[in-house]
Image: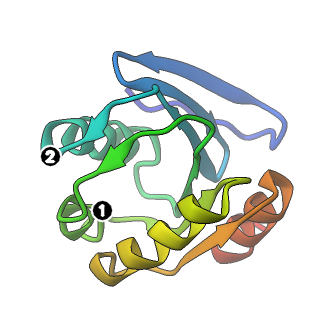
Amino acid sequence: MNYSLMNSNEKHIETFDFGVAELHRDYILMVMNEGITVDFEINRQLCEYAANYYKNRQFGYITHRKNSYSVDPYVYKETSKLKGLVAFAIVSDKHIRRETAILEKIFLNKPLRTFKELNTAIAWVQSHTNSN
């Protein structure tokens, strides 16, 4: 599946068992379900989906941590190999979730930042893509 979003206002919404992804021209906005653990299988599904969707294009990944869930930090080793991924943002209004994300950064070999505001995260991710 390879969608072509040429208009920056367009988006495609994909619902998974573990959460909902909004796919925009140059970034994925992901909201995970409450209580899940992002493990190798979930990460594999997301990486495959992103690789197909953004084939031969740069993109960013934004996780909007509205819900409480856990992440196996070792999945970031595989995420780092994802061709085209140029930035990773974590958005949360909870200080503890942003602090936890700092530890996750150790495992990801891509630029990663945490944000309180979604709009700020989107702007930062878009500044890293070549579609501007």
Which image quadrant for residue 43? Answer: top left
- In the depicted view, which residue is nearer to us: 85 or 54? 85
- Residue at the spot x=24%, y=36% of the render? 42
What residue would you read off at disc 2?
Answer: 40
Q: Secondary structure at mark 2?
A: helix
- Residue at the spot x=54%, y=39% of the render? 30
> Which sits earlier in the primary sequence, circle 2 or circle 1?
2
What residue would you read off at disc 1?
Answer: 82
Q: Secondary structure at mark 1?
A: loop
Give the amino acid type for the residue marked by disc 1 in the picture.
Leu
Q: Is residue 28 left or right of residue 41?
A: right
Estimate how packed mark 1 is, as few (under 14), some (14 to 19) or many (20 or more) residues with alpha carbons within 10 Å.
Answer: some
Does residue 66 appear anywhere in the picture? Answer: yes
Does residue 129 appear anywhere in the picture? Answer: no
Figure check: 67 above or below 83? above
Closest to the camera, between mark 2 and mark 1, is 2
Q: Position of residue 102 (x, y in %)?
A: 47, 78
Q: Is residue 29 left or right of residue 33?
A: right
